[in-house]
């Protein structure tokens, strides 16, 4: 059967499902995305609250992502970059650590910051150079360790690992133990080195909206939970049965395992995060940079004044502050404890902040242990059904889009 005559049913309207549908539709297939929630995008959504743009948890888009960058219109996204570096709260002060190759103004301040030795900072430069010489595909062939073991073998001191890498990559991997695959570390380090962390001017949800806008009308059905999956169709909670020439499960890994019990053994553990959004009359930082906690003694892992990066995230004259706490701590008194902790970072002005929303995201990222992901086709087949998602390549926006596109490519082949 030719691609143009195939009807493909896609359960799940997150980035993997949308990328798969865009690829199929542009090849002439009839794709239908069935999404259980009230809007597509999964976690990559943005809500408007009192004129503020609140993403579903603090997220960034790395503009060096090759597959995501090729699929999306980055110019239309109007990406606003972060400065290449971070402020690290250590020994009672916010210390600046910058990529001095891209921002040489802070060379001496970064070199002398008590975050690690000068030798550590030279090792960062060497790692940046070395990973610049290899492709993402080659990274997938590298031996895989935990990120902590990888950094230790690379000669980094315990101080820079504990004070910088645990906090910076804690915000990316959502765990400070650095147990994540070193391939994933190399991939993200390469992306940060070759480009910028950015925010779309109208919120991370603009990524989802852009993909959805490329699909023909009535391609996406919302508020339609799927209860049964078979190779020739799906059953909705309403009892409606939809027939298709191919079926794709593009949900998160836990939902996929429920719909296809044969996948249960491959279901990953999850990393969770709590994001608190505050409104303020003025920014505590006044620059497009992330602030990190240099120890794990408190609740806060990282702070970002989102409106310093993309002013459109907040109404005129206001600032939007995002605070990430790893895991799902007890909600009672959490706001009070976080604000009290940040007083030592920013002073008493923190008590004037007003909380807008708290997002408790239980399934924020799938666990990516060594030797999991970054290899293979990026999708699976189970009982004649295709399965895609970031859990099958890398726990990232890029991973979701790679998996969705590769699944579509597999469907192009004659049945």
Image (tube, helix red, strand yellow):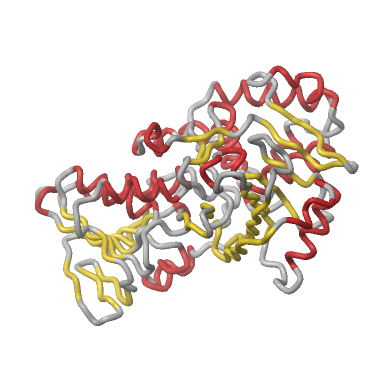
Q: Is residue 82 above or below residue 218?
A: above
- Determine whether 165 is above or below 236 in the image: above
Where residue 174 appears, as percent x and y from the top left, is: 64, 53
Query: Can residue 195 be seen here?
Result: yes
Give whichever of 122, 338 is nearer the camera: 338
Closer to the camera in the image, 105 or 178: 105
Q: Is residue 233 left or right of residue 118?
A: left
**Residue farthest along the bottom direction in this orientation:** 239
Q: Where in the figure is residue 344, as x and y percent of width and height?
A: 86, 49
Q: At x 37% / y 72%, what residue is drawn?
A: 259
Residue drawn at (80%, 63%), measured in percent from left and top?
337
Question: Which one is in front, 9 or 107?
Answer: 107
Residue 180: give x, y in percent of width and height: 63, 49
Q: Position of residue 33 (x, y in %)?
A: 27, 60
Where's the C terminus, which quadrant? bottom left
At 59% from the left edge and 43% from the top edge, which residue is drawn? Answer: 307
**Within the image, what quadrant is residue 40 found in?**
bottom left
Q: Classify residue 242 as left or right of residue 117.
A: left
Q: Does residue 148 appear in the picture of this structure?
A: no
């Amino acid at each position: 059967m030719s691609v143009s005559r195939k009807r493909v049913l896609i359960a799940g309207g997150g980035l993997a499902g949308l990328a798969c549908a865009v690829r199929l539709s542009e090849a002439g297939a009839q794709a239908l995305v069935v999404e259980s929630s009230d809007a597509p995008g999964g976690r990559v959504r943005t809500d408007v609250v009192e004129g503020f743009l609140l993403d579903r948890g603090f997220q960034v888009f790395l503009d060096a992502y090759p597959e995501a960058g090729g699929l999306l219109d980055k110019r239309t996204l109007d990406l606003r970059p972060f400065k290449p570096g971070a402020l690290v709260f250590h020994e009672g002060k916010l210390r600046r650590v910058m990529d001095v190759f891209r921002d040489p103004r802070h060379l001496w301040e970064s070199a002398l910051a008590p975050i690690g030795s000068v030798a550590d900072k030279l090792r960062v430069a060497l790692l940046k150079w070395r990973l610049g010489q290899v492709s993402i595909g080659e990274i997938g062939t590298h031996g895989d360790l935990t990120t902590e073991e990888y950094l230790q073998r690379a000669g980094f001191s315990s101080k820079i690992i504990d004070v910088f890498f645990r906090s910076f990559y804690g915000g990316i991997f959502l765990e400070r133990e650095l147990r994540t695959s070193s391939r994933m570390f190399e991939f993200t380090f390469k992306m940060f080195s070759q480009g910028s962390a950015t925010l779309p001017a109208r919120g991370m949800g603009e990524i989802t909206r852009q993909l959805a806008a490329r699909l023909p009308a009535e391609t996406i059905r919302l508020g339609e939970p799927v209860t049964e999956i078979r190779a020739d169709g799906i059953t909705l909670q309403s009892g409606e049965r939809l027939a298709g020439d191919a079926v794709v499960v593009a949900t998160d890994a836990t939902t996929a395992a429920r719909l296809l019990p044969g996948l249960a053994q491959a279901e990953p553990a999850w990393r969770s995060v709590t994001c608190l959004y505050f409104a303020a009359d003025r920014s505590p930082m006044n620059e497009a940079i992330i602030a990190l906690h240099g120890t794990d003694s408190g609740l806060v892992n990282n702070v970002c004044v989102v409106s310093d990066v993309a002013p459109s995230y907040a109404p005129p004259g206001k600032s939007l502050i995002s605070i990430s706490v790893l895991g799902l701590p007890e909600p009672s008194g959490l706001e009070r404890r976080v604000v009290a902790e940040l007083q030592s970072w920013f002073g008493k002005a923190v008590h004037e902040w007003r909380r807008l929303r708290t997002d408790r995201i239980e399934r924020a990222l799938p666990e990516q242990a060594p030797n999991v992901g970054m290899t293979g086709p990026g999708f699976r087949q189970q009982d004649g059904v295709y399965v895609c998602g970031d859990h099958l390549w890398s726990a990232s926006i890029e991973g979701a889009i790679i998996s969705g596109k590769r699944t579509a490519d597999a469907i192009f082949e004659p049945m």
